[in-house]
Amino acid sequence: MYSPIQDGIEKTARSVRYTEAKPPGHLSGWVDCFWELKTERVLTDDFLLHALPDACVNILFNQVDTNIAGVTALRTTFEVLNLGKTFHYVGIQLLPGVWQGNREEIVDHFVGTAYAGRLPLVKKSNELSGLDFAAKQPVLAKLVQWFIDEELVVSNLVTEKILANLDSIRTVSDMAAVAGLSPRQLQRTLQQTTGFTPHDLLKVLRLQQSFKQHFLDLYADQSHFIHSFRKIAGYTPAKYADKFDV
């Protein structure tokens, strides 16, 4: 099953801890992981998180100020998020294509204001506050089940087929064949359910896969790989590996 790498945390970062856990088995078709990112002491300098696109949607909770929450996702390029000198976030990373809530609520930048939407995110953030990460996970699982019951999170057979066959997909035509759709049907379906064009989704999934298998399995040659990687991630592959834990 598709499981993207964590966002970029510099190797020199100290007293910043990232933890993730797989969801209960009955939620594995919708959730990649539950995660927590927090400081263990006040930092000397602001911490910059180098967020990479992965086609996932995250439900984010700020545990320092529980009024701050949101639905987040990146498109096709990285974003540098200044989290400050002290922070504590927890979240749910949903697999590509399963979030069918209000797409206008999704933000692709730092979330620093109180949540004003209709989802029970602030109530849930207050419920999570004060619990350790292990104790937070059943609370997060209940929220996912609520999303499913409300049909805000749904099964997406097209993205399921694509993610299950990533190793054999090289082109948009391959993606359409795997999904059992014509290229035009694929275009329409993906834009409706994910907001991505097939080409943009393929670029993001290729980037994520390149961390786990040899780039020549995914790209025509090294030059193509380096150009595509730098455009999406902001660094060449070598410089990214030197700078961040991967």
Image (cartoon, rainbow, N blue to C red):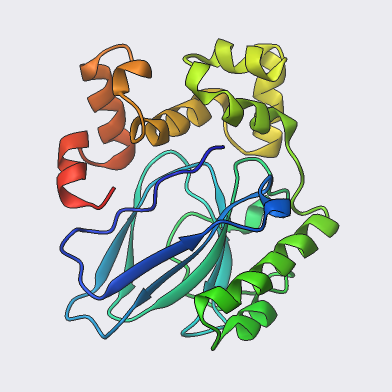
> In this rendering, does residue 246 appear at all?
yes
Q: Nearer the viewer, residue 24 or 98?
A: 24
94 relative to 41, above or below: above
Relative to 239, is 128 on the left or the right? right
139 relative to 207, above or below: below
Quarter occupied by residue 50: bottom left
Q: Residue at x 57, y 10 (%)?
A: 173
Q: Nearer the viewer, residue 70 or 32?
A: 32
Find residue 6 and report its horizontal and vertical position in percent.
Answer: 39, 52
Find residue 35 and report its horizontal and vertical position in percent.
Answer: 49, 64
Relative to 122, is 228 on the left or the right? left
Q: Nearer the viewer, residue 98 or 27?
A: 27
Q: Where, quadrant-wise, is the N terminus in this rendering?
A: top right
Find residue 12 and report its horizontal and vertical position in percent.
Answer: 15, 63
Q: Residue at x 54, y 89 (%)?
A: 130
Quarter occupied by residue 141: bottom right
Find residue 45 and report its horizontal and vertical position in percent.
Answer: 18, 76
Relative to 68, is 155 on the left or the right? right
Q: Residue at x 22, y 52 (%)?
A: 244
